[in-house]
Amino acid sequence: MSIFARIRRIPFWSWFWFILGALYFLLPLYATVNFSLRMERDVIGFKAYVRAFEDPEFLETFLYSNFLALMTIVASIILIVPTAYWIRLRLPEARRIVEFITLLPFVVPAIILVFGLIRIYSSPFKIPLTDITILQPLTTFEVGTDILIVAGYMVLGLPYMYRSVDTGMRTVDVRTLTEAAQSLGASWFTIITRVILPNIRAALLSGALLTFAIVVGEVTLASFLGVPAFGPYLFLLGQHRAYEPAALSFASFLLTWAAMGLIQLFTGDQQVSGAH
Amino acid sequence: MSYLSISRVTKQFGDTVVVDDFNLDVEKGEFVSFLGPSGCGKTTTLRMVAGFEIPTSGKILLDGADITDKAPNQRNVGMIFQSYALFPNMTVAQNIGFGLRVRKEPENMVKQRVEEMVSLINLEKHANKYPYQLSGGQQQRVSLARALAIHPQVLLLDEPLSALDAKIRISLRAEIRAIQKKLGITAIFVTHDQEEALSISDRIVVMNTGVMEQVGTPFEIYNFPKTRFVANFVGSLNTADAEVVDPAKGLVSMDGVQFESAEGTEGRKKGDKVKIAIRPERLSFASEQKKANVVDATIENITFLGSVVRIQVKIGNTKFNMDTFNNPFLELPGLGSKEQVTCSKEAVLVLDE
Ligand SMILES: Nc1ncnc2c1ncn2[C@@H]1O[C@H](COP(=O)(O)OP(=O)(O)O)[C@@H](O)[C@H]1O
Ligand SMILES: [Mg+2]
């Protein structure tokens, strides 16, 4: 059957809703792009983009946020992969509880999270029952704050990362693969690094890209912890400029799409991706 | 002293006893099947040998060493799963080499052994393919090669053929048996398929609800089932209610029709309620020379099953199946006609009710 014949078979109302939905999504995007191209009067051009990218603060905050995203992704994988693995393998009855916990970031707003973090970590660590300080408050020095914000981002990314990893583990029968590897003499470390991880790469990638998208655009945690991240920068820019924010938001749209494309590429044909 | 010895092994999950007092000695190079219905504890027993489950009590010895509590990756045991369990991210050759690389064997040794194994299973052309590019039968052969590559002391197979279609199942089971014999490897094979167990094994352990019912050669299990369960589970069987008439002579009566049995009535009294059981292929039409059990029967139905013709006859008030080999010159009686059928004394099994 030709593509046209197939398209003609789709009922009218399906088309109607599809087009309505597409317009709802595409019109504002079109308006943004259109606006971003009109920084100079009567000329269509990329001036707003050039301006936005020229700003040194743009690059600085963008790179810093990328660094935070990378740290968050690495830490999340180290924490979540063995957890999800162990739950699938030995504690299936804990699945419900853990799934509930992973949904909490959707229910508890980021603002609550950040105030909690600040309250707890803005006082020094002392050895219990003594006055000996072992660590200055995390909020008072740069590395400390980075650790704090990465921890916060891990919480925000938890639903996406955990679910991706868990789904990835469902598609390969981790339990039987583990037993096969064990009977061949493999240790836990070998099993996780050489059997489990390579087989959930697609899932890891989609979890990582979603985490990346969250971290790079995040405003609340970054501004309350006072770090020079991309989210707050974009926010401030939006309050003082007109054209550049439009340009940047379209650019970040493209970035997101590229990320989604990558996910599709790697998850679309799971078996082939697992084969390389 | 036997090579693999499972002694007094019991396994409980919570309060449920899943395997109860399991005792088995397996000789080196022997092929033993665990046969029984689903849920009877075959897999659990096998997993205790593999180390994936620890017995609640009892001991497992392998070549003289106590392995009861050893971790699975410390035992030298090959395991084959129903779902093949090949590593999807590795090629055939990498799968087969995995166990050797884990053991840090030198790379040239690994390569050589992988080649050996690949040719053992006749998949030379597919060595660089990924599992998803192979058929189910090919995948299971790879998993066999992967398990054998590490020179395991015992090969454990958990329903390895259940996911395959009928033709492949039969050819692969012959191949497994041939390879096992060629390498002289000790194997335990779990199945719920009696034909599979009968055709492949040196010995069969018939299990029911966690208990061993009978251990014996396929010949013994089929021809001399010790319990009613075994008689019923292995092969097909006609059974009927009967009553002991004369324990000394082995006479029992079914709806007034008398049968003579060669064994099974000792220790019983006249009037005891029993079951008699006769395999369909042991019944035949009575010829001129008189034999022990000749009874009147009505032909009820005739079914062609290919090489066998199944004739349903009514003896007394009970319907029996009677199997006879098909041949073009077979003269079959008409439906409803009255005939005499017979079976030897040895064919009549007397079982507890
Ligand atoms: N991990 C477990 N926890 C609780 N019950 C189990 C577990 N594994 C198996 N069982 C139970 O033990 C019984 C025997 O199982 P299994 O050995 O798999 O039987 P088979 O392989 O003969 O079909 C079944 O009733 C099963 O539900
Ligand atoms: Mg089983």
Image: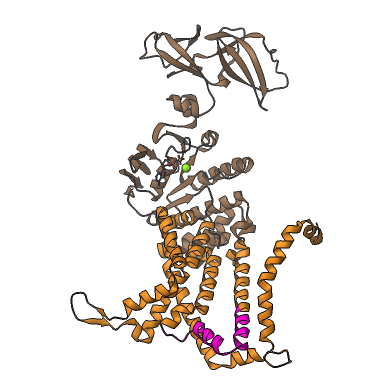
Magenta stretch: includes residue A240: yes
Give the percent coordinates (x, y) of residue A120.
Answer: 32, 76
| Chain shaded brown | B
Residue drawn at x 73%, y 58% is: A13
Q: In this view, does B284 lie above or below A10?
A: above
Magenta stretch: includes residue B227: no
Residue A273 as seen in the image, left or right of residue A138 = right
Residue drawn at x 69%, y 68% is: A22
Give the percent coordinates (x, y) of residue B173.
Answer: 56, 42
Quick check: can you spot residue B113?
A: no
Residue drawn at x 70%, y 12% is: B334
Q: In which quarter of the image is the N terminus of chain A?
A: bottom right
Q: In this view, does A272 lie above or below B54?
A: below
| Colour theme | by chain
Give the percent coordinates (x, y) of residue B189.
Answer: 48, 42
Q: In this view, does B222 lie above or below A192?
A: above
Front-lying residue, B23 or B201: B23
Highlighted range, magenta: A225-252
Q: In this view, does B7 lie above or below B237?
A: below
| Chain shaded orange | A
